[in-house]
Amino acid sequence: MNGILRGHTLSTLIFMNLTSDWIAGFTDGEGCFHVSVNRHKELKIGFQVLPEFVITQHERDIQVLYAIKKFFGYGTVRSNHDDRSCLRIRDRVGLNKVCEFFMRTSLKTRKAQDFYKFRTVLLMMNDNKHLNTEGLIEIIDIIKQMNTQDRSTLNTIREELKGKDMVHTNDENVGDM
Amino acid sequence: MNGILRGHTLSTLIFMNLTSDWIAGFTDGEGCFHVSVNRHKELKIGFQVLPEFVITQHERDIQVLYAIKKFFGYGTVRSNHDDRSCLRIRDRVGLNKVCEFFMRTSLKTRKAQDFYKFRTVLLMMNDNKHLNTEGLIEIIDIIKQMNTQDRSTLNTIREELKGKDMVHTNDENVGDM
């Protein structure tokens, strides 16, 4: 841990108490609600929906990322390329917790709009709607309105799904990715 | 106002209540404590110290900048180049208010270190120490530790000041810039 947290004492980490409003303000500045759709051969529908909540910071502020991770109780802090570090929450339970938090503690910037779309996708995934063609197309249409993945890639996937005329129901055992 | 605030209703502006902790979190993400030293022929010492608190945002979130301006009661919101807007507080009384605020509501990132240096410069300016050579050199040495102006420019000014062997006292009438 010392290697990652060079320059930060353990006490800094332990005693960094973050309030809900501080986290909302910091997320309004630095947070990102991201959903990507990737090809995934193991899944019957052929695509995986990957929602994530990400905060990127200069490595010198990695202790803040650990504190936010601790606050939500989920996530992974990693050093990125160059001198950037990021907290990434991908776990579904963790993301539901993140969504509950931001429903209680509202964002003030237009990022709130991305959040509401992100939450809609997550709720659909909670209902396994990402595992059938109709639901996945609906999710893609929502993602396209967010500031996320390359729209042309999403359009290609969307066309592919429509062309396949695949019908997946929620009952199919394709794994909950 | 409608031109600047396109897409934002007046009610959005009026009812955006920002808490102290949200502002601290947002500043940890997006705020900047900046001090520059510029040549100024009208001043006897030849240089002007210009501290400013700046928050830059995409134009779509200009209403947040207006809300922060309203919170502090000081500042100017302007559209920058491209699609960026920024809130800039330069007024000394306003900056003292900003400093008082961040002494009460602490920043969590390393930006706090910049803030403390910024505050030190401001307190020195409140005592007119920027108007004499010794004080100005001390201020330059503080600014050099912040992530601000080009260090080589500051070093040039510093050397010039030392070389001039100028002695300005706080009593000299050089104007309070």
Image: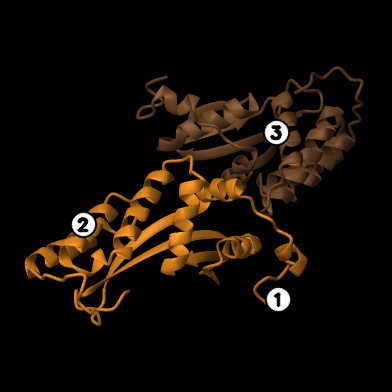
Chain colours: A brown, B orange
- Name the residue beneath numbered marker 2: B138
Mark 3 closeness class: few <14, some 14–19, many ≥20 residues within 10 Å: some
Residue appearing at x 51%, y 59% in the figure = B55
- Asked where in the image residue A128 lies, by quadrant, the reply is top right
Secondary structure beneath dot 3 equals: helix
Query: Residue A47 or A82: which is nearer the viewer?
Result: A82
| Image location of residue A5, percent across then percent down | 40, 26
Query: Residue A67 or A3: which is nearer the viewer?
Result: A67
Marks counted in the figure total 3
Marks 2 and 3, Cα distance to the nearest angstrom?
A: 46 Å
Q: Are marks 3 and 1 on the same chain?
A: no
Residue appearing at x 10%, y 71% in the figure = B166
- The C terminus of chain A sits in image quarter: top right
Query: Residue B73 or A61: which is nearer the viewer?
Result: B73
Mark drawn on residue A175: none
At label 2, the amino acid type is Glu
At label 3, the amino acid type is Val
| Image location of residue A113, percent across then percent down | 74, 50
| Image location of residue A134, percent across then percent down | 89, 37
Confirm or deny contact between disc 1 and disc 2 (CB under 8 A). no
Chain containing the residue with disc 2: B
Mark drawn on residue B2: 1
Mark drawn on residue A98: 3
